[in-house]
Each structure stands twice: as structure tokens, then as C-alpha cells.
Image (cartoon, rainbow, N blue to C red):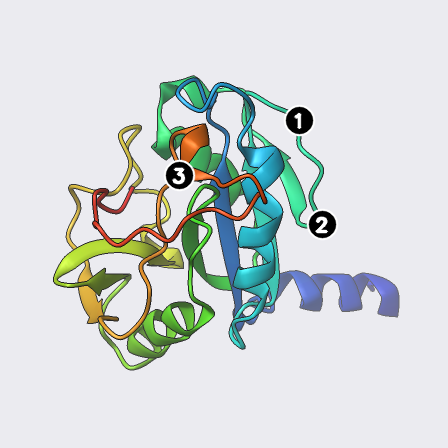
Amino acid sequence: MRSSGARSRASAAETPVARDVIAAVVLAAGASRRFGSPKQMLLLEPVVRRVRGSREIAEVVAVLGAHEVQTTARVVHCPDWERGPGASLRCGLAALGDEVEAAVIVLGDGPSIDPRAIDRVVAAWRGGAGERVAATYGGVRLHPLLLGHDVWDDVPDAGLRALPAALVPCDDLDPPGDVDFADQVPEGGRPEEQNDYRHGAR
């Protein structure tokens, strides 16, 4: 006869984990060669603060690679970051707990990310839009990008730009921006607003 402790452990093992958590993965593993110094030191924490402004996000994970950066987010180190943004994303997803049902992906060099855009892609996903849901600005697909748990295994090294996603218009919000060069950051340290929609979702 099994002891009550053994029965309890077996019962726990057989009970499926309830997935009811939305996490954010902030990709910040790049080398920042065009910037000339680790831009994550300037940009990452403001992005983390904006992500936390979403009412949907329970946890924020920052994926680092080329540079060590101080952040209040939980840090995941990706040794394969040079393979591409998909490799960094896979590291971030692998670090999430079994209770996480979807992950919202944002870029660590997109300092104007609006928490309302995060709320909108989550709402669309909850409404059955699909397992990949991305925000658009002026008809251009950018971030945030939500991935339901069922598609976490389908992340190529090149990232998710070429994969289909349901689109959520966020034309009334500022796009997240994409700071590549140091002269895009004024002397005061606040990145300039960008509205040229240059980059697709990675």
C-alpha cells in the first residue's frame, strides 16, 4: 500500500498544470555594433518599465547575450545569440514556467513600446485570433508579437518575421521604435521618437 505522501505526489504529477499566465520576453542579446557601445545599458530598463505597464503581463524576462546589463527583469543568458534573434527567443521561451500560456515578444531597443499595444494583442489572442498575434502601425507589422504556447517550438533562427500572424491595428499608438545608432539618443539620454516603421517583427 502506498503511503499518503506517495499518493499525494502521484496525484500532483497526474494533475495538468493550469496555464493562466502571460509573460513578456524582451530580446536584448545583440552586440550593438552600429551603436558603438552596449545600447542595452541605456534602453533595456525603460523598455522593461513600459512592458510592466501592461495589465496583462505577470512576468518579464530579458534575454542577454553579447553584453552583461543590469535590469530589474529576470535575466536569461543565451550562448547562441549570434545565430539570430530566433535563437535568443528560444532561450527566453525555454526559461518560462509551465504555467505560462502565452509570451509577448518585444525588442530591447524599442523604447517607445506602448503597454496598450500589449493589452490589445493579448485581448485578440484571448478572443481566438490565433497563436501568433502582432501589432501593426500604419499597416506595418511590428511589435509586440504574442506567441501562444502551442507554437513555441516553431521559432527559426531568423526570427518570426516570415511567419504568419493575426494583425491588430494600433494606428493610434506610437510605434515601438528601433534605436540602432547613438545619434538617435539625445544628450539627455531619452531616445528620439521614431515613426518611420522601418523594421518588421522579428
Q: Secondary structure at mark 2?
A: loop
How far apart are the alpha carbons under marks 1 and 2?
A: 13 Å
| Position of 52 relative to 64 (above/below) | below
Q: How many marks?
A: 3
- How packed is label 1: few (under 14 Cα within 10 Å), some, or many (20 or more)? few
> Which residue corresponds to mark 1?
68
Q: Amino acid at mark 2?
A: Thr
| Position of 151 relative to 17 (above/below) | above
Q: Amino acid at mark 3?
A: Val
Q: Is residue 99 visible?
A: no
Q: Amino acid at mark 1?
A: Glu
The image's mark for residue 72 is 2
> Which residue corresponds to mark 3?
179
Q: Residue at x 66, y 32 (%)?
A: 69
- How packed is label 3: few (under 14 Cα within 10 Å), some, or many (20 or more)? many
Q: What quarter of the picture does the C terminus occupy?
A: top left
The image's mark for residue 34 is none
Give x and y (percent) for residue 87. Answer: 40, 29
